[in-house]
């Protein structure tokens, strides 16, 4: 079975709709066909300041949401990044193979550093794409299911895997991004020019899966559209409506063409009201399942402990090969 690896940050607490449609939904599907490793990336979370108690709670909460979304610990390996020290260890090696200019070109860093104020951005934020390289290479992943915003980091991973292999001999699998075109980028409901994001969206533009379903319905109903009246998919000229159609289509399994036909001659309000219902039907059981996993923290922690053990077995083997190739003297 080909292998997949991906991760999600335990930052804002609730996952948002972009996380789910762009990434987590694919993770659930891929556990059927792939040897799948999924993690809560707490090391990535501390690239920006985190309250320790919140970070701990949000790490459990992220794991609970992944299980609620349909990850099955019998069919995938679910773990917390900091439980597997090899991530930080291989990241150092990869840091030393990366050019300063190369790292400076990462657009996610530039965006996030600009938001923080350049002086306040941490060195960790600067090198986080390289930690991500290590995350992926440790598991010899063939594919990396992520949203469009992560494409550049998977490209960097490919470059560094090839560089390492070229310099030290074949060691790492060169991975490919797994990005579904339709849901690669879910947009902010208030500003359909930017991606929905934990760190950049305003509350009204962001659909948090764990919000009160009523609040979610309200946000859908007040989504920004355009001054036209036709319900039609046209990402360039009608980004707001197109985003709503994408969300509607993915959550219901109906094609965009079907939806365009159904809403022919109808008003935007009708589309939004129906989509609000679809959304409520989706988030209501999701919230309940998440709460059930949270309430049984013993089971949750034991799932994560088993996941870490399985992950470490793979990661330790890759790391020891990489260390040997680099020329580190084995500890006897
Ligand atoms: P941050 O803004 O802090 O980076 P985020 O909203 O991007 O947070 P992450 O934990 O960084 O969330 O991303 C988890 C996964 O969700 C990644 O694979 C990312 O590509 C995907 N993702 C995030 N936002 C979107 C979006 N708007 N559309 C599609 N996929 C997304
Ligand atoms: Mg992100």
Image (cartoon, rainbow, N blue to C red):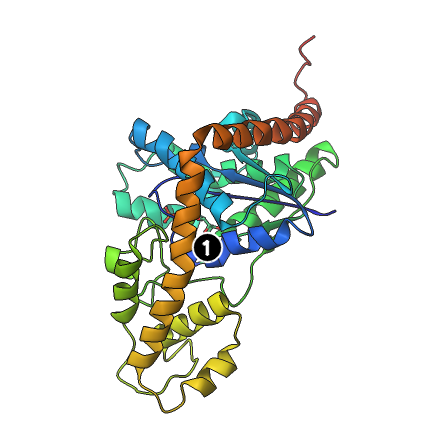
Q: Position of residue 114 (x, y in %)?
A: 29, 47
- Decide: is 165 above or below 230: above
Position of residue 186 in the picture relative to residue 273 (left or right): right
Residue situated furthest top in the rendering:
332
Is residue 121 visible in the rendered structure shown here?
yes
Is residue 101 visible in the rendered structure shown here?
no
> Residue, x 55% and y 46% (percent of image)?
71
Q: Position of residue 318 (x, y in %)?
A: 68, 30
Residue situated furthest bottom in the rendering:
265
- Decide: is 205 above or below 155: below
- Decide: is 26 above or below 220: above
Pick the front one: 242 or 173: 242
Pick the front one: 252 or 13: 252
- Residue 123: image quadrant is top left
> Residue, x 43% and y 52% (percent of image)?
286
Q: How many marks?
A: 1
Q: Which residue is mark 1?
A: 20
């Amino acid at each position: 079975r080909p292998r997949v690896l991906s991760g999600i940050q335990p930052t804002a607490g609730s996952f948002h709709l972009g996380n789910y449609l762009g990434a987590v939904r694919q993770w659930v599907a891929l556990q059927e066909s792939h040897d799948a490793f999924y993690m809560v990336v707490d090391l990535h979370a501390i690239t920006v300041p985190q309250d320790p108690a919140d970070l701990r709670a949000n790490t459990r909460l992220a794991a609970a949401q992944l299980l609620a979304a349909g990850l099955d610990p019998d069919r995938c390996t679910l773990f917390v990044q900091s439980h597997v020290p090899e991530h930080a260890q291989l990241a150092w090696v990869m840091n030393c193979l990366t050019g300063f200019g190369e790292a400076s070109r990462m657009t996610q860093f530039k965006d996030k550093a600009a938001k923080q104020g350049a002086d306040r951005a941490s060195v960790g934020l600067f090198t986080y794409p390289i930690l991500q390289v290590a995350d992926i290479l440790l598991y010899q992943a063939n594919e990396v299911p992520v949203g469009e915003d992560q494409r550049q980091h998977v490209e960097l991973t490919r470059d560094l895997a090839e560089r390492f292999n070229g310099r030290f001999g074949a060691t790492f699998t060169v991975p490919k991004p797994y990005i579904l075109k339709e849901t690669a980028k879910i947009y902010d409901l208030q500003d359909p020019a930017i991606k929905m994001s934990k760190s950049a969206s305003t509350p009204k533009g962001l659909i948090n899966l764990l919000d009160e379903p009523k609040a979610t319905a309200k946000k859908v109903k007040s989504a920004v559209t355009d001054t036209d009246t036709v319900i039609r998919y046209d990402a360039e000229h009608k980004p707001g409506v197109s985003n709503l159609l994408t969300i509607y289509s993915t959550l219901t399994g109906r094609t965009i063409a079907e939806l365009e036909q159904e809403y022919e001659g109808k008003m935007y309000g009708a589309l939004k009201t129906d989509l609000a219902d679809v959304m409520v039907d989706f988030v209501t059981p999701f919230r309940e399942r998440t709460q059930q996993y949270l309430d049984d923290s013993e089971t949750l922690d034991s799932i994560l402990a088993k996941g870490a053990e399985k992950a470490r077995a793979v990661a330790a083997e890759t790391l020891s090969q990489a260390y040997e190739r680099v020329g580190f003297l084995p500890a006897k």
